[in-house]
Image (cartoon, grey):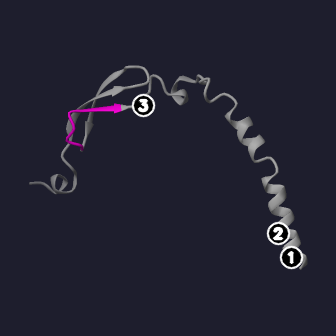
Amino acid sequence: MSANAEIHPKLFTVETKCTGCGNKMTLSSPLEESSLCVETCHKCHPAYTGEKRALQAGAVEKFNQKYAGFYASKKQSSDKAKQS
């Protein structure tokens, strides 16, 4: 038995299905599962496709609106604490 065989895990062939687009892939994994489901894959993930999804559009604006005064209120409270 070689040194590499002692430190590396045994790999199994796993059938993977994307629940987002239905794409099927065959992968190698140290998991002894016969099949796995993933939410997104390289064919439907926005980072790879360059498309924005309707659910993600406006997420930055919603975040900015929600936390618009957060930094200012924190700064004011710390300034008051310094004056005391």
**Crowding near the residue tagged with mark 1, few <14, some 14–19, many ≥20 C-alpha atoms within 10 Å:** few
Residue at figure coordinates x 80%, y 61% from the top left: 74
Distance from the alpha carbon under mark 1 to that under mark 3: 49 Å
Residue at figure coordinates x 84%, y 66% from the top left: 77
**Crowding near the residue tagged with mark 3, few <14, some 14–19, many ≥20 C-alpha atoms within 10 Å:** few
Q: Residue furthest bottom?
A: 84
Could you tell me the amino acid type at mark 1? Lys
Identify which residue, 56 or 7, lies in the foreground.
56
Residue holding disc 1? 82
**Crowding near the residue tagged with mark 2, few <14, some 14–19, many ≥20 C-alpha atoms within 10 Å:** few
Could you tell which of marks 1 and 3 lies nearer the N-terminus? Answer: 3
Q: Residue furthest left?
A: 1
Distance from the alpha carbon under mark 1 to that under mark 2: 6 Å
Could you tell me the amino acid type at mark 2? Ser
Image height of 10 relative to 80, above or below: above
Could you tell which of marks 2 and 3 lies nearer the N-terminus? Answer: 3
What residue range appears in magenta?
31-37
